[in-house]
Amino acid sequence: MPTLIESPTTVPAAGQPPKVIDEYVGRVNSATTAVSVAHMRSPQGWTEPGQTPQFDEFTIVLKGVLRVEHEKGTIDVAAKQAIIAHKGEWVRYSSPEAGGAEYIAICLPAFSPDLVGRNE
């Protein structure tokens, strides 16, 4: 039988100023370890520490621009675009433009603080 996810769980987010993470599928909201699906909303000026995650992250930008720094430069991902951050590669996310960014993040396996590999 299919499992209905009636509502997301808002989970704590890294970075400043604070962003909102609503997890629909994942370790917190559905006890799913294989994949996580979250709706993110980050304000203008938000930035988080760099990370070297042990999962692939597929991000679809719905509104605004999400900046993705990586070892060889920077990619700005606009609304209606997507980006894949590959397992084991260093990245840092931010939303520098007016209006911030709204996006969907899908992680395989599911996001976990133990797997994210954040820089101190």
Image (cartoon, rainbow, N blue to C red):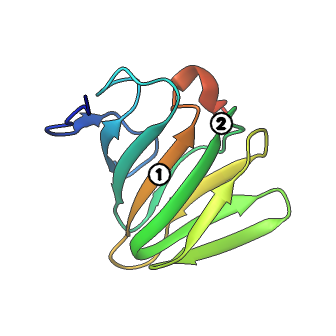
Disc 2 element: loop
Disc 1 element: strand
Which residue is pictured at 37% across the width and 46% down the height?
38
| Badge 1 or badge 2: first in the primary sequence | 2
In this view of the protein, which residue sits in the foreground, 2 or 73?
Answer: 2
Percent position (x, y) of residue 106? 49, 47
Percent position (x, y) of residue 58? 57, 54
- Residue that badge 1 annotates: 105
Q: Amino acid at mark 1?
A: Ala
Percent position (x, y) of residue 49? 59, 43
Q: Residues within 10 Å of mark 2 (few under 14, many from 20)?
A: many
Q: As displayed, is residue 103 above or below residue 76? A: above
Left or right for 21, reference 82: left
Q: Amino acid at mark 2?
A: Phe
- Residue that badge 2 annotates: 55
Q: Residues within 10 Å of mark 1 (few under 14, many from 20)?
A: many
Residue 51, disc: none
Of the 4 image quadrants, the one containing the C terminus is top right
Which residue is pictured at 53% across the width and 25% down the height?
113
Percent position (x, y) of residue 72? 85, 63
Numbered label tally: 2
Q: As displayed, is residue 68 above or below residue 16? A: below
- Which residue is farthest front? 1
- Asked whether the beta carbons under mark 1 and mark 2 sit within 8 Å of each other, the answer is no
Left or right for 18, reference 115: left
